[in-house]
Image: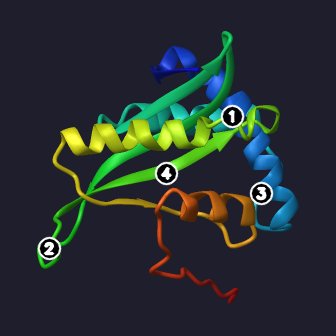
Amino acid sequence: MEIKEAFIEDIDAICELHHKLALYHEEQMVGVFKPYSFNDHKEFLKEIFKDEKVHFYLASIENEYAGYMMMEIRNRPPFMNETKMGYINNIFVDDKYRGKGICSALIEHATNIFKKDNIHEIHLNVYDFNKEANDRYEHLGFNSYCHLMSKKI
């Protein structure tokens, strides 16, 4: 397995992987997500690539992209003990590569980068319906401490 930083030239590969994640979200949360549009996501990601704080990484096995991660360092309010935190915005591993340690390797990669920047805490969001991901993150040492709720009005 190889993990490399992704750049704007890799945007199509990220969109292909993200398409699979988006379909899963659409199925689980009907009416919340619009049907996937490659071009809409590509334009959205192009804007994100302009943000120097955000970094993308692609994991590959035998020259085939198996997963990706988007991460950044975020500032926290000055009244917090830790004023910066690592944040994993998205992480996805293609179904056919699950169980091969890719998610763990991507998170370890992020952890090493954050440690170099003197970051001591990593946050990520995961939907409640994604039991497999919730279990994986707990296995990797993440703990739930906040529950985001929504209400239609």
- Mark 2 residue type: Asn
- Would residue 119 be found to the left or right of residue 132 on screen? left
Earlier sequence position, callout 4 versus callout 1 = 4
Q: Looking at the image, is 13 positioned above or below residue 126?
A: above
Disc on res. 100: 1
Question: Given contact means CB atoms under 8 Å apart, are the residues at marks 4 and 1 in contact?
Answer: no
In the picture of the structure, the residue carrying the numbered disc 3 is: 25
Give the number of the mark in front: 3 or 1: 1
Earlier sequence position, callout 3 versus callout 1 = 3
Disc on res. 81: 2
Earlier sequence position, callout 3 versus callout 2 = 3
- Mark 3 residue type: His
Q: Residue 119, percent across and down?
A: 22, 52
For mark 1, give the secondary structure: loop
Earlier sequence position, callout 3 versus callout 4 = 3
Distance, label 3 to label 4, CA atoms, is: 15 Å
